[in-house]
Each structure stands twice: as C-alpha cells, then as structure tokens.
Amino acid sequence: MNVTRRRFLGFAAGTVAGTAAGVPASWTLSDWMAAIDPGVRPPTGPEDAVLSVCKLCPGGCGLRVRRIGGRPVKVDGNLLHPVSGGRLCPKGQAALQSLFHPDRLSSPLRRVGPVGSLDSFEPRPWEEALAEISERLRLLHQVGRPESLAILRGNQRGVADRVARRFLDAFGSPTDVVVDRGEQAATLALYLTQGVRAAPAYDVRSTDYVLSFGSSLLEAWSSPVHMMRAYGEFRQGRPGRRGKLVQIEPRLSVTGSSADEWIDVRPGSEGILALGIANVLVSEGLYDRDFVSERCVGFLEPLAGSGGRLSLAELLSRRYGLEEVADRTGVSNNVILRIAREFATARSRLAVGPRKGPLLPGSLFDHLAVQTLNALAGNPDRPGGVLVPEEAPLAGWPELPSDESAAAGRARPRLDSAEGGFELGLSDPERLAELVLRGGFYPIEVAFVMGADPVLTSMTPERFAQAIEKIPLVVSFATVPTDTALYGDWILPETHFLERWDLETGPPGVPFPLVSLSQPVWGKASPGTRSAPDVLIELAAEVGGSVASAFPWPDVPSMIRAEVAGLFAARRGALMGSEFDEAWVRMMEGAGWWAPGYRTAEELWSGMRESGGWWDPFYDHGDWRRVLLTDSGRFEFRTDLLQQLGDDRRPPYALAAAGSEGEPLGARPLLALVLFEPLPVAGGVGAELPFLQELLEPGLEESWSTWVEIHPETAARIGIRDHDRVRLTSDQGSIEAKARVTARIVEGAVAVPVGLGRKGGGRWASGCGANPLRLLVAARETVSGLPAPEATRVRVAVVGRDGHGEGRA
Amino acid sequence: MPRCAGAPIMPDERIEKGQAPTGPSTGEPAGVVASAAIGFLVFLLLTTGLLTVGSGGSSSRPVDQPVEFNHRLHVEDVGLECNECHEFAESESFSGLPTAETCAFCHEEAQGNSPEEAKLVALLSGGQPLEWGRLYRQPAHVYYAHSQHVSVAGLECERCHAGLAASSRPPRRVRKLTMDDCIDCHEDGDAESDCTTCHR
Amino acid sequence: MARWGMVIDLDRCTACQACVVACQVENNVPPTGADQAELGRSISWLRLAPHGEAEHGTRPQMHLMPVPCMHCDNPPCTKVCPVQATQIGEEGLVGQIYARCIGCRYCTTACPYTVREFNWKQPDFPEPMEQGLSPDVSIRPKGVVEKCTFCHHRLQVARDRAQLEDRPLAEGDYVPACVESCPAAAMTFGDLEDPNSEVSRLKQSQRAFQLLEELGTEPKVTYLSKGEWGGQV
Amino acid sequence: MARFELDLGEDERLLEPIAKTGRKFWILVAILLAIWLFGMVGYFTQLRKGLQVTGLNTPVYWGLYITNFVFFIGISHAGTLISAILRLSQAEWRRSITRAAEVITVLVLFFGVGCVLLDLGRPDRALNVLKHPNFSSPLLWDVTSITIYLICSTIYLYLPLIPDIAILRDRLGKRQRFYRALALGWTGSEKQQKLLNRAIGIMAILVIPVAVSVHTVVSWVFAMTVQPMWHSTIFGPYFVVGAIFSGIAAIIIAMAVIRKVYHLEDYLKIIHFNNLGILLLVMTLLWFYFTFAEFLTTYYGAEPSHMQVFLSKTEGEFAPYFWTMFVTCFVIPFAFLANHRTRGTVWGCVVASVSVQIGMWLERFLIVIPSLSAPRLPMEASTYRASWVEWSLLAGFVAMFILLYAVFTKLFPIVSIWEIHEGREHSVTEVTERVESYLPGVAESSHG
C-alpha cells in the first residue's frame, strides 16, 4: 500500500510539475509564435469628410475622403462632383496607399554617386537644396540666359502647373514641356478639321452605337470615371434603349471584353477601316447629307487652299474601296458592310478615335479618319456626338511685371518645338531630349521635373535618361522617387496631393467647364515635404526682382482665393450640386439667366469647400461659331493630310498578314508590337501601389509582372508555350517577359503592357516587370511629328521554360 | 485535458471490477491513468505544440494615469453627468475620454488643493495633451457602439461600468471584456445575438 | 427582417476593378508583394473571374465578372466549419468570426466560388500604412480565414444611426464599399425581402441569373447578363 | 505477490529483444531522433511564420498535411481492423501477427491526428472544436470517430498485452515498477483469463464498425462538399477499401522487418506472408474495381467541372502521378501477388507492399490536390509544390513512428507470447473439433 500510494503521489507530483513547467513553456512558445494578434489597432474617433481631387491620373475626379479621428481611412468619389459623381476607379480607390506609401521621401536628396540608383543619393537639408538651386537660377538670370531653364511637368491643370508656367514666364524661358501626350493626336485632329484647340469630348452617354477604333474607352480614358459613368447610362440607364459598343482593335482589351463585338484588325489599320466604313456610308448614301452640305467643305471638291487634289468622296472611292480595305485590315467585306450599315442606321452613333492611354495617343491619321467618319455621320457638336470642351474662366492673376531679359528669353523658340510642328504649342519631350543631347539652339542648364516621369514614360526612355544626365542641374519633385529623379541631381520630397491645397480646371474629355477645389485631408502632412508650387514661389523670392514680384501671394491658399474671386467675376455657372441642381442650372442658363446659388466670392469659396467646386453644366449644342473655327467656318475634310499620311504610312500590318506581304513568317518572324496601358498602371503611375499591381490583367490573371501576349498559331511557329520566359528584341533594345499564349491578340503580333519596368517607384515598383517603351525605334509620323510606336517590330525568343515550374523565380 | 486522461479509465475499471480483491492496490490504475495522461500530453506537446493554449498571456500590467482622477468627487460631490466629460457616449460608438480642453474648462486654475489637481493644472498649463490609460479593453474584432447602448437601449452607465462613478481613484487594472459579458446581457435583454451584430 | 442581396449588371460592368480596390481599402486588407502574389497568397475578397475565352482557332470572347462572396442562403461553407466560426445570420449575411476560426480551411475548400481567403502570413502594413487603417474592421491575424462580409460593419453603423434617429433603415443607408465605388453603377445592393427595392426589381429582369445556381447554394448575388442591342432592357 | 505461471519454453526468445539492446538500436534511435528534430525545426518555423512556409496557396488550400492525414489514417486500418476480423473468424495463423499489426494502428493514429493539427492555421485554438462544436461538420465527425477509434484501439492493444506484461513483470528483472503497474495484477487465474477473453471478444466486435466508420468519415470530409471529384457516393467504401489495402501492406512490411531484425523466422513464417499476400491481392482487385467505377462514372457524366479535374489527372499536370499510382497500386502488386512463386516469398510480398504504400500515398495526394487546383470558377492557380517544411514533417512523422514502434518492441513482446502459447496448447484440438463440426459424417463417427 505504501509503495502504491507513493507511486500515486509521484505521478500526481509529476503531473503538477509537468503542468507547472508546461504552462510557462506554453506562454513562451506562444510569444515565440510571434504576436498572434497583429498588434495593429487603428484608433477610433469622430468621423468627418474632406473634399479633394484625385491626381493619380489626369481624370480630375472629385474625392470625398472619409476621416476617423482626423485620419483619412477611405477615399470615395464626391457625390456632387460632375466628373466622379460619387464613383471612383481603382486608382482613386488606392489613393490612400500612395499617401501612406512606406517609401515616401522625407528629406531632399542630393546625388553623390552614379545615376540610376537611389543608393547614390544622400539626404541633405532643405536650406542647402534651395540655396544651391536658387544660386544657379540667379546666375542664369544675371547672365541673361533665362531660356536655359526648362520645366518638365505633368498635366494636372492645377496650381502647380500654373505656377510653373508663371515661373517660366517671369524668369524668361519658353520651354514648358508637358510630358503628357494623351490628347495630342485627338486635339490635333480636332484642330485640323474644326479649328478648335481642344481635345474632343465624346458624348457616349447620349448615343446608341459606339464604334471604338482601338480606344481605351473603358480603361485609361482621358477621364476614366466620367466615361465609365456615361457608359453605364449608355448601356442600361435609359429604359428601352441599350447602346451597342463595337470595339475594333488587334488585341482584345478590357474595353473589348465589355463590348458587344470585337472586330480584330491588323495592327495599325484602324484608321483604314474607319475610312472604309466612311466609304460605305458615302457610296450607299447613308451619310448625313444635311450636315455635310451645310457644315462641311471638301466633300465633293478638294478643300481649297490645302493643296489636296482629291475630294473626300474621290479619295474614299479610289483608295478605300471595300476590297482594298478588307485586304488591308483583315476584316471581311461582310463585316465591314454590316458594321457600316449598323452605324449609319443607329438612331445616334459615334466613332471614337484610337486614344489608347495617356502615353499612347494614337496617330493623327487614325484620328483624322475617325473625325471624318464622325462628320459624315453628322456628329460634330450634336447630342450623342463629338462635343468641344470649353475652358474654365479661371482668372485673377495680375499682369507679369515687365522684365526685358525675361521677355527676350520668352521670345526664343521652345527648345522642344523648334523644328517644325504645328502652332498649337504641343509639347514634344522626346525632341527636347534629342536636342539636349545633340545640342540645340541653346543649352538647358537647369531643369525642374514635376508631376512627370519622362525617363519612364517617354517614347525614348534611354535617350531621355542620357539627356537628364547631361543637363547640369536637374531638380525632381517626387513623393516616391521616380525613374527620372534617379538620373537627376536633386530629389525634393513633395507633399502628396491629398496633403495640399489646389484648384484645378476640368479634365480633358469633359465637355463643360469646371473648377475643382482640393483641400488637405490630413492634418499632419508628411514631415520634411513641401509642395512644388510652394518651392517654386520660394525660389522665385530667392531669385528676386521681377521673378519674385510675379508671385504677389504669401502662399498657395491665398493664390487660390484670388483665383476663385476671378471665377466669381465670370458671372456664370454654379456650385457643384445634385442632379436636381444641375437640371435647374441648365434650364435657367438655357433661358438666359444666371442662378448660381452664391452672391459673393466669399460664398463661392465656402460653397466650393463644401461641394467640391464650381462648374457650368450648360452646353449649347450647335453653337457653330464656337466649335467651327476653321477659315471656312465649316468642318474641313482634310483629304490632303489623309492622302499624305496614308501614303507615308508604313505600319506593320503588312508584315502581320501571315506572309502575304513583306517577308514570310519564318521560325523567328518579325512581329508587330502592340502596346497597351492597363488602367491600374496607365500613364506610368500605379505600379508603386500593391493594390494596383494586383489588378494588371484580370482576364489572364496577370499581376506583378510584364507579360507578352502572343497568338497560339504564332507561338507554335516560334515554339513558345504559355508561361515561357521570352525575350523581345527590336532594333532599339530588348526586354524579357512572360509569354501568354492567347487568341486575344491577332496573329503576327505581340501585345505588351506599358507601365512597369521602373527603376524608382519604391519597394513594390522597382525592378518589377519591364518597360516595352525601350523597344521603340525613334520613328515619327509625318505631318504631326507624333512618335509612331507602331513602326517598331520585334523578334521573340524563348529564354526559359515553364513559368509555372522551375523557371519561376 | 480531461478527454485524454479519460481514455484509459474504462479498461481499468472493467478489469478491476472483475478482479479478485487480493489484486494490486487501488493506486495502480490511477498511476496508469496518470502515466497515460502524461504520455499523451507530452506526445501532443511534442507533436504539435498544442500547449500553446490561448492567445498571449498579456498579464494585466498596472495602468498608469496622468492624473489619479476622482470619479466620486466629480459625480457625487460636484454632480457632473458622465456625458459631460465622456461627451460622445450618446452619439458615437466610442464614449470619448476627456481632452485637455475638457478639463481646462474647470481646471484652468486650481479649484482646490489636491495634489492630483495640481498635477493636472501643471499639465494643462504646459499645453500637453492628456493621455489617459485605457481601463476597458474591448477586443479589436468587436463592434460596440456606446450610442446604441446608451441612447437606444437606454442602459445606465453603471450597468457595465459598475462602481466606477463611486470610486475615488481609477482602477489599476485593465478590465478585459469577454464575449460572455456581452452575451449574458444580450440574452437577458432580448437583444440581437447574431454573430454579425457584434463581430466585425 | 431584411435579406441583403446584390445585383451586378454585366451589361454596365467595365471590368475596371474599382470594386476590388474599394473592398481592400475598406476592409484593411494588407498589401502583398510580388513574391507572395506569385505564390498565390494575395488576399482579395472580391475578384474578377474570367470566363468564356474560347479555345484557339475560334474568335475568343472574354467576359469578366466581379465575384464577391455570394452570401448563399444555403451556404456550403457554414455546414463544414467544425467550430461554428462561420455562420449565416438572420439577415442572410454569412459572417466569419476571426477570433474563433482555427484555420483548418475546410470552408475554403468547400466553397464552390473560391471566394474565401486564408491568411497565409501575418498581415504586414509597413510604416506608415497603418495610419490609413479603418477601425471599423478588425485586422485579421495570420492563420484564419476571411471573406467578403458585404461590409456588414456598415450595416452595424447604419442600423445604429437609424435607431438613434428613430427611423427604419432606408434604402441606400447600407451599401457595401464595392457597390459605392462602381463607376458604371453596375452593382446594386439592398433588401431582397422588400419588393420595392431596386435589387428586387432588377432580380425580376429576364437577364437575371446566378452563379452556379445548379449547385443549390441559393446565392444572394444575382447577375444580369449582357443585353442585346436594339432591344429590351 | 502473485505471479503469472507460464512455461515459456522456446518462446523465451521472444523476450530477447526486451532483455538485450545492442548498439545498433541506439544508432537507429539517434538517426530517427535527428530526422524528428528536423521535422520539429520545420514545425516551429511554421508556427512562427504561418502557413506561408508551406507550398499551399489559394485555391490549393490543402496539400501534403491532409494527404498524409488520410494516408496515416488509412494505414491505421492495418492493425485493429484486420486483427479483429482474423480474431473473429478464428483464423489461427493470426496469433503471431496481431500484436505487430495493432501497434501500427495505435501509433499511426496519433500521427494522423497530428497531421490535421499541423494543418491548422491556429493550432492554439484547436480546443475550439470542443468548445464550439458544429455537429454538421464532417471534420467534427472525424474528431469524434477518430477519438473513439483511438480509445478502442488502445484498449484493444492493451488487453491482450496484459498477460505478456505479467510475464515481463515476473521474469525480466528490470523496469519492475513499470510492468507491475501495467500488468494490473495479472495472475492468469481462470477467472481473469475468462474475463480477458470476453473483453477481447467484445472489443474485437466493437472495433470493426468503429474502424469502418473512421475511414468512411474521413472520406466524407471530401464527399460532403460539392467539389468536383470529391462529391461522390462511393467515397466511403472506396476509402475503407483503400485503407485496408494500405493497412495490409503496412503489416507485411512491419512483419518482414521484425522477422529480419529479431530473427523470428519461426514465428513469422512464409505462410503468414502468403496468407496476407492473398488478402492484399483481393484488396488490389477491389481497389482497381472502385477506382475504375469512380473514374468511369465521372467520365460518362462528362460534367465540365468534373472533367477538368478528371483530365488533369489522366492527361494533365497530374498524369505522371496518376499513372505511377496505377502502376504501383495495381500493376506491380497484381503481378507479384497473383503469381504464387513471388507471393510465396517474403521479398515478393514486401515489394508488392512497398509499391502499394507508394501508390496509396499518391492516391491520397491525387484526391486532395487536383480537385482544389481546378476550381469551378476559373482561377489562375499556381502549381502546388510542397515546401521543405511539409516534407520535413512527413519525414519527422515517419521517423517518429518507426522510433516509437522500435521502442515498443523494446518494451513489450512484439509477438504475443501467451496467445502463441494458448494456441499451441488449445488450438490443435479446438480446430480439429471445429473442422469436424463442419463436415458431414465426421461428428457421428468420432462420437459414435
């Protein structure tokens, strides 16, 4: 008994001891498992909202930023804003990720090592940065070479742009380079046919049939949310009336996937098809006779004074007959006829030009062809047609102080448009880079880069990098280092757009004038950052003299107040408001009244803070004196240009025709390069945000890398399998990417997304994917001088097998 | 872990019952149980680290407050209502802890001669924010709205914060709320007890 | 008692994926990097599912449809959870109790829509990203399953607000983040029990269908297929 | 103190492994412990970093752990079920193999359960299964039936061990306390003997439905979902057959090793291998029948989502595994076992058994992974490749299993001494009587 009791006690003691040892051990273990509770506990607090404007693309969406305890936690569309209408695209939704990006800069960085790497930069105090830069500027100003200053900027139409422009004017430089070609081709086409300097606004909302010639209508459009809202209404917003979208393009895009029909054409032949359809309209008498006879010239006789020898009717019938167009585009006769008749007989129809994204504006030829088609359909300035936007009446800036040296500098030709080009003053960043490298009329000694990343987004990325390196002092503003910044000398940490005041005019593609107010949504702006306009004003003060006095305001908010006062003085429009308000204002203005809902500039200001801004929703259709500003006062069919451009065109569709023209497709054929911009990374912005990287291509479920789409037949010929790693080589360079074999791209071509392959951009963008712009040969379209990416051809070779398996990094 | 120890009991009992009383002592089956239990436990521990029961020990450390606030003095003697300092209790999900401005409303200058008040006045004059230590800790995955309980259900503050108004100094320990604290009341009060009513 | 449901009009949808990001931001979904994404570990409560890309040779058609949790009336996931960590509530929302989930991933395998996500790792919000996190939604730890909740935290708040103002919940008081963001207004949300609600009206459409309805899961997400030109809405 | 009097005679040698332990054993222990430690390193890595250290992903949420779980639970049918069936059918040749088989069951069950625990994202909350049980979840049925099975199997292993433990208590001279405690005062009295036999009999009957239920329920974990090629009515019997299949193969391997290491050729004779070989052959054919039935119905149904999985197995990315499985589960064992010349050898049976083990593991793998890799709504799934952590844990579990098995043979006789003894004393007469009772004419003549 004793023995057994002892044993029992022994066991009991053992258990207790085991437990005693086990419990602390388990705590240690659970600690070691590393904080199971993530330990993140967002604090709560009172909720409110602040209105601002998104600047992740030029779309200009009004934002409503929800805050809890003063911290922004969610970004949504501002319900009253006429562009976003309470909605937002994925980029806008991800705005907070860019605000709270872990790689935001917090101190000026000076390059001390070789270009191209963030490791070559050292943090320096703001004072040192400003001292060095202002010293250089003063010197330039003193020696009378103010034109040696250049500013490369994005196109956000906000304070930063106006201050930059003003700074250049006051300083005396003409070289204000907007690194945004998005609307250039469409603007040029509108200018050449209607004489108006604006990007056309397509009224998709009110039409029934949209023929989209390779446009990214439902992706990275000029103002994506505005267009997508219109598209929703076009499709299902009008009882009994459902719009049809036909997408014509060599690669089935996301827009194409939403379309009712995809018509696959050979790369670069969209414009030819547009003219082919125009020819059907003319030959079958389906065009708008009234509009053509009353408002157009050049239809039956050559346009006077243009040097064109053919009338439009002649040009179409001679050059764009059914058979020939079918042959050149790869679209069958039947389809061309059917589409043309559908288009012509729709109650309201619209052709949209091939603007593929902020970096890929399309060619002038294609846009002219589409403009021509639209005119034959009687679309200019008609509801459901092509509208002409109006500038916002923003004013309030005093006259520039007089300064002879500055005036002389301003009078010099812009470096980027010094050779040819139209008088529209369209920027040409690639030419700027070329002239910097070759040595133009005058050297560029100081360049500011703000809101733009040309080393990533220009059509000649490598030349641009060299040019940036060559300019003695390049100052970049950036929240997260851009590629361009890495080739410059100073990187100045910029405040995020959600952290600053701004007043911006309406985005392209929106027909009515509007002015949106951005307010800082975040009490504690990131430490060490300053906004670009603030820095420019500060530098102006340092330079002194007339440059300093060009900026009479103490800070940006008071500048904005002055501009709003100017807006008040325009005596038109209204505060942004509900749909009911909108209808009211329309009705009143249509009747010739002004019913703004504010009586003083002060009321306008506080109203704008609460509603998001000012706009004028009234659009007077058929105001021909405003929208037809050509010499003839009519819509001009530019057969001269169509003919010349058509003749000069050497697009690769000939090669794509499966060996029928050009060299036969061998085992390593030359393939057409089709570039596209996925909305999440369009314009070179977005790859720095992980949420957007996830979304690159939902159809193929591609994310976080660059891929190459290739047709199964073409792939089989070369021996490429799905998910292989391939190398694309052009005359200019080569990149590596993952091959995706899909019938979404036509034969004889490869499609590659633009927007990845960055050196900068922080942890998520840097080194992710490849930049296909590096493949582009330096070809340009004649007449327009626009870069012609479609002239590039590539060869594809497998460099690694099985993206799923061993080859996976 | 009773279920583990439970396993070997049955055979022991069965055989024991059928056994002559001259058999070994009653200690042995217990020993078997214990050894089996320990064996099982040790096994599980080694195999899976199952002993990592419960998430985190977070032994409640004493909470330090910037000022030893006297609730009784303010509520009973001065006659303040709870929501005069916890101003969001009726309208927001959180009740809100008084900010420096709230205190400064009365205590810009000392009202009495308590050393704690002196501390407060010093803090206020220094322009520092008051950073109160949290005493009630609601798990992060729980949605709880003071407004709902105070304004709609009409509960008294004492229902959950019992005795706080009568205390002369803040409790020193964090009170961790468990799901039972909520469910008991919800069932009594016939309130919703759908998971998604509170879990978020 | 309400029964919350969603209607997604594929005729309006442009596959822009605003809903996807709106959901991630609203619900404190942690960012992933390229390596984790490559391994199939990124979390997204709402994704765009491709369907209908034809085999090669024929003209491909590609359709993309947003797929959130269907909040099935007969959910396959709740039945298989061994610890009752996922349950269907009285108003038809299929909730996930992160604090109880043991991470066995039985529900994820049982869901025919593959809309349940597992936290393969501890969520990582590199400084200062946690500044932008919402207190309305808990941060899920590693090792638990999470899923679309129809933003039910918004319902919690909306219902409290309505009760505080002593009124019934009105249409539009409670709308998930995805629906709110949709640029083309392709998504509609509301009470399926209320015959006058927009969702009930749209559900009557001839174009209405449900995903994998043959499985008998009775999803509360209804799709409206693409319409035909020249006709009928 | 009472002693268990038994004349061991030549069976004395069955105690040898317990009495003497050589250096080789300790080397083996060291190696196996090292492998186990490697597995533990893997597990602690997983605890710390989460399941990201595995090859799992969305939508392949389950991988090696669940494969191993099903595999181990399958092997567990080696012992208890087979030994119970043999006991109930009074197959006399069972006597020397039941113990070896039953130990497999008990030990391997722990590892089966362990695999599920490995798979949990939150092992710290495993007890929620008891706190908040959801009885409609097949996983809970699993917990229940496996627990019952574990209890029954342990009892069923323990009961026939008692007399042998008493032998050790009385003869071994070491670990006295240990054996005394476990022997429960066994004296071999008639009353005890009778009780023990009745208890064993009851347990043998009880254990069969429990064992069948265990694997049925394991199959239901898959079959109760609506996923392609999981949602199948024959999954219950299919899994049970597969389990018995791999179980028998496991016994054959264990027997061969014991026979070789402890030189027990007299106890584990060729006839044992031959008999088990025949059983294995039957199961081979049954397995083929079920597999054929399962795939044929899927193929004829030709439901797209099912066909997607079907094709991924037969000609897609899983085809190499699938056809290896077919060869190792059917072609090789059939070839070796149908031929009496190879079946009648130890190596022949062992080759067939090892082949079956490989094949059955692949079968489990092919059930779990392909269905998850091809979700109904298309999704670009990254291929599942098990990580080193998952392999290390499989290796660790197998090593620990072997180690525990080896330790068991060092603590208890792996061949049941008293049952052999009993058989020798009673069986011959008993079997004669039994056989006579079947046959016409014999009974009268002998009684007459």
Image: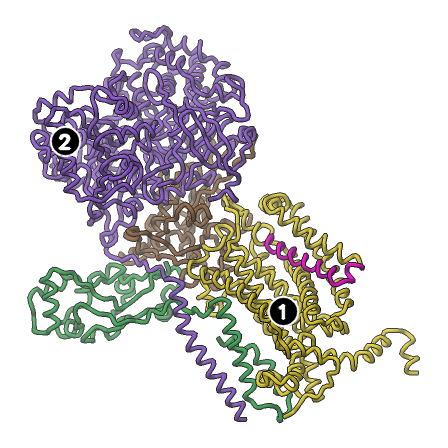
Most foreground residue, A474 or C45: A474
Indicate whether residue A143 is drawn in magenta. no
User: What is the span of residues highlighted in magenta in the rendered image?
Assistant: D340-367
Up-down relation of residue A352 to residue D148 (above or below): above
Chain of the residue on which disc 2 is drawn? A
Residue at left offset 13%, top offset 20%: A408
Q: Which chain is yellow?
A: D
Q: Which chain is green?
A: B
Chain (purple):
A
Q: Position of residue D339 (x, y in %)?
A: 79, 57
Q: Which residue is mark 2?
A: A137
Residue A469 % position (x, y) = 27, 31
Q: Which residue is mark 1?
A: D105
Q: Quadrant of the N terminus of chain C?
A: bottom left
SS type, badge 2:
helix
Image-based side of B75 in relation to D185, left or right: left
Which residue type carries mark 1? Thr
- Near mark 2 (Cα within 10 A), the count class, few <14, some 14-19 or many ≥20, is many
Secondary structure at numbered mark 1: helix
